[in-house]
Amino acid sequence: MSQTISDVPDDRLVKGNHDFASITKLITDIPQERTPTWWYIAFGISNILLAMMLGMVIWLIWQGTGVWGLNSTVGWAWDITNFVWWVGIGHAGTLISAILFLFRQGWRTAINRFAEAMTIFAVMCAGLYPAIHVGRIWAIYWIFPLPNSMQLWPNFNSPLLWDVFAVATYLIVSTLFWYVGLVPDLATMRDKVKGKISRLVYGVFALGWTGANRHWQNYEKAYMILAGLATPLVLSVHTIVSFDFAVSIIPGWHTTIFPPYFVAGAIFSGFAMVLSLMIISRKLYGLEDIMTIDHIEKMNIIILVTGMMVGFAYGMEFFIAWYGGVEYEKFAFINRALGPYAWAYWIMITCNVVSPQFFWVKKFRRNIVLTFILSIVINIGMWFERFVIVVTSLAQDFLPSSWTYFSPTYVDVLTYVGTFGLFFTFFLLFLRFLPMVAIAEIKGVMPQANPAYYRQNKR
Amino acid sequence: MSKRGIPFGVLAEFENPADLMDAAAAVRRAGYRQFDTYSPFPIHGMDDAMGLKPSKLGWIVLIHGILGLIGGIALQVWSMDIAYPVHISGKPYLNFPAFVPVTFAIIILLSAFGVFMGMFFLNNLPRLHNPLFHSDRIAKATDDGFLLCIEATDPVFSEERTTLFLKEIGATFTETIPLEAPDKSPGTETGTVK
């Protein structure tokens, strides 16, 4: 064959001089080595925060929702803000694992395991808030269509019930997806660990995986279908979360732009969260060859794109409020930017619209310190976005006599801080005991995995 | 080892994915059907080399999805319109647009269960015992080994000739795996790497 055209090689996804065995060793050594001291410190702090959160939740259940800063005008505040924020963070994991898989983005393999774990734990944190916000948590099972002596059924016309189904489905499907991805790597762990008990435990969860091609065939099909299912699911979950607001008639909530706007915001904040976690972990665990600077750059581009979408949505909301000509709607938006919560609004604009603009410059996209700082800033901004939407719309609605100003109590604040304890407790356990990079998948995107690689080299 | 009893099959190791794929094609051409290749990741093109039919998983998922669709609509129509109709702010009892999100979630949920259980069902997993793990070598298949095992149940199988054949097509290592577990001596348990 004449070689008139030479291939333009893609950037290598795995840096350094790695073969399959060194990749296995790099990742399976992490759960096997001695637990690092920083891990104990971080785990201890997370546990304290978790205990604090549990204390606050118990106090809330004991006393009632009055211990939060809620009142009869502002019935939703930090709880729903936190719920939407955590669910949104979770969406990046599914985006990376499902949507980027369908688009055949090989670079996702370095971070998908990690991001999926983040999804699951973030959705757990999110699910807490609506559950404790119902007030009488002992009757929480009424949200499910269970036969009962009153012969009553949940109201399927209500977006709040749609939310129950959407978020529960999301948590279950994300967990299944994560576990399916884990099985081959658990088999690798089973074959690598020395201890008898650890081998048994990894072995049980690996379900007898051998790496047989007849199994890989069904496995790959399963993975593809799950990705195909998770893609519309992740878009629908945040759409339905936005229906909680959009289906109501409160000015500032009742807009059709909410579903795409919420989904873009979710991906925006989720990628920021993945970056914050990844930049720390790759350093601590020496995974710079796998989670490379190229990955950070690609993620920063997605942050820039989704940040622009969010910025566009902010602008569009104002345009429609003016163009729609509804007095209450117009007031709601002017009040957002100039009213009593203007400080929150401008924090939101600064963090979400201004700060990602740094990423137009390649040098900034590849700057780890700047990326880390901006990823935190973006998550703060996205929290404020949800706060602005939830609270400003409620605090000043139709009737001026019932206007009020919401202030959180210490229970609000400590419950929110405490969910970080919940999140990091699980996340640190994940880092400690499970392979944090999808070993089988990362091998699959190395050039040596392709039979054609050997045939070319032979020629 | 082969004298110890009935063999489960002959295991062979190949150097790289390309050699394994050529070997799988050769094994198939030689008339073997009861064989499988073992690799740390799915190798692109191996299904064709082994002559496998497409996975049936899609059909299992489709059935689950249809069940979800019917079940989701039935649940909502029955509970909102038949079992206990409640008049809620002038909305119709059969409010189909409002039933879409929950129906969608149930379809996805049941399909995902179909994928998860269907995949492990088709793969015959979880499995408590697999004679393959009598070999220490198979553990390489989850690390960096590319292995092929021809099982003794294949009509063309003959321990000596199959071993010889595998060596001829380029196996770097061959081993007969016994069907029964070899005597357990300390430190050589099944399925472990020493």
Image: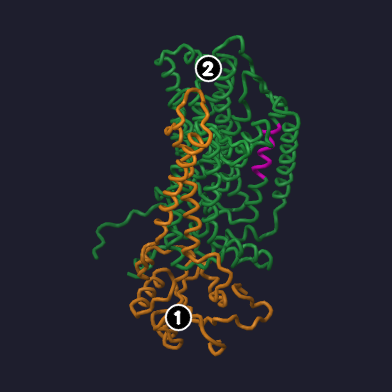
Residue in the foreground of this view, choosing between A133 and B52: A133
Secondary structure mainly formed by the magenta segment: helix
Image quarter where the N terminus of chain A lies is bottom left
* Residue A31 included in the magenta stretch of the image: no
What letter labels the chain drawn in orange?
B
| Rendered colour, chain A | green
Choose top left, top right, bottom left or bottom right for residue A52: top right
Mark 1 and mark 2: Cα distance apart in space: 76 Å
Point out residue A66 in the picture as x, y percentages from the top left corner.
71, 25
Residue range in magenta is: A414-424
Q: Chain of mark 2?
A: A
Report whether mark 1 lies on the same chain as mark 2.
no
Q: Which residue is mark 2?
A: A337
Q: Which residue is mark 1?
A: B153
- Looking at numbered disc 1 in the image, what kind of residue is underneath it? Thr
Within 10 Å of disc 2 (Cα), the crowding (few <14, some 14-19, many 20+) is some
Point out residue A5 in the picture as x, y percentages from the top left corner.
27, 57
- Looking at numbered disc 2 in the image, what kind of residue is underneath it? Ala
Residue in the foreground of this view, choosing between A386 and A309: A386
Residue in the foreground of this view, choosing between A41 and A49: A49
Classify mark 2: helix, strand or loop.
helix
Choose top left, top right, bottom left or bottom right for residue A343: top right
Tell me: residue A324, above or below residue A287. Answer: above
Q: Is residue A312 visible?
A: no
Tell me: residue A344, above or below residue A241. Answer: above
Image quarter where the C terminus of chain A lies is bottom left
